[in-house]
Image (spheres, rainbow, N blue to C red):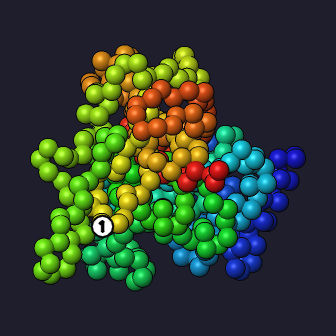
Amino acid sequence: MDSMIRFDEYLAHLAAGLGHADREAGLRGYCSGLMLPLARKSVEPMAAHLDPLHASARHQALHHFVAKADWSDTELLRRVARWVLPTMDLSAGGYWLVDDTGFPKKGRHSVGVARQYCGVLGKQDNCQVAVSISLACEQASLPVAWRLYLPRDWAEDAGRRRKAGVPEDVRFATKPQIALSQLQALLEAGESRHCVVADAGYGVDSAFRQGLTAMGLSYVVGITSAVRVWPPGQQPLPPKPWTGKGRPPVATRRSPEHRPLSVKKLALALPPEVFTELTWRQGTNEPLSGRFAAVRVRTGRQRFGKTAAAPAAVATDRMALRAGRADPLLAVHARGGHAAAGTGTHRPSALAYRARLPGSQAGLGAGALRGAWLAGVPPPCQPEHRRLWFSARAAPAP
């Protein structure tokens, strides 16, 4: 009985954000249907179970509420957050998890459906994809932003848009662009700032990382082993000397002998003694552990002006930001022995891991990570990654 009372109170809280009292019945019917033990949670089987004698009329009412009624999904997500956040312990810090979730579909008429990667299936298939931001702590995660991804083929097909009822103001945007707009909206709404966590589908996009930096957000994002960095102590060559004609050169340079390396090549070049065994959480059968090392590096993709420095960042494999240093840091993970580091098949792992590193490593050379501990954070879906790229924070004033 207590659970039913709490459920009614929760629905009354949500209904206050629908904008019209007539929509409350649709909300109650739909949410009640979601709680039923049904194989398919679509409106037709929901209607048949909620009101068997008037299934057709209930189906029409539920469909109208979901597809036609003019209520704001953003407002409902905000109300869900107001209800849940007081029960989440964010005293140790929270995280904004950026992820996309696939919904397998048949046919081609559902909005945004296309042949694309579907995380639920682990392969490319016909599906819809939604980009989400979830606020997570060690005990729970909560979606705070959600938007359907509209592939370019859909966005540029006026006939399909019109038939499916896609609003005129919805234009094509990449998934990282959608995530940045969602984060910006959260900040403008006055939400507390949190470290952003995302997989390599977002982390390899330099514009995404730069957008996070522009917002003043620290981040932990996935990268691939092909990402290029400058090894310790190296940086781009200075601009060419000015000849006195035209504008003075400002672009930094590279040469065949002086170029950034891939993360994989740099990892394989590290000596065995710089690696340290770390265990970060209990797995299904045994504790999850690995051998890690840290190296300070510079990002190697962008070209910076004469006086500009590469933005501080951290490239890593399942590791996290070291507090108190502004220099970039590369942390590498060797599976099953140093000789195997970066070779063979790299098994994907859960995205949302965080670490607290005490900043014991000074200097620019390779060094073992000391005193680190890692804890699992529940992901909102099934995100996976191979390597991580971290923003760096400025060192505190002495």
Which residue is drawn at the image coordinates 36% and 69% (left, top)?
A: 173
Q: Secondary structure at mark 1?
A: loop
Q: Is residue 384 left or right of residue 216?
A: left
Q: Relative to 98, is 265 above or below? A: above
Q: Is residue 221 visible?
A: no
Which residue is drawn at the image coordinates 26% and 40% (left, top)?
A: 262
Q: Is residue 221 left or right of residue 158?
A: right
Q: Is residue 3 visible?
A: yes
Which residue is drawn at the image coordinates 35% and 66% (left, top)?
A: 307
Q: Residues within 10 Å of mark 1 (few under 14, many from 20)?
A: some
Q: Position of residue 143 (x, y in %)?
A: 60, 56
Q: Depth check: 355 or 82 in front?
A: 355
Q: Position of residue 87 (x, y in %)?
A: 78, 49
Q: Depth check: 36 or 125 in front?
A: 125
Q: Relative to 325, is 25 above or below? A: below
Q: Depth check: 20 or 283 in front?
A: 283
Which residue is drawn at the image coordinates 67% and 62% (left, top)?
A: 192
Q: Amino acid at mark 1?
A: Gly
Q: Is residue 223 left or right of residue 184?
A: left
Q: Position of residue 204 (x, y in %)?
A: 34, 52
Q: Depth check: 41 or 332 in front?
A: 332
Total of numbered circles in the picture?
Answer: 1
Q: Which of the 4 image quadrants contains residue 394?
A: bottom right
Q: Position of residue 17 (x, y in %)?
A: 71, 73
Q: Check disc 1 and report the residue beneath it.
A: 305
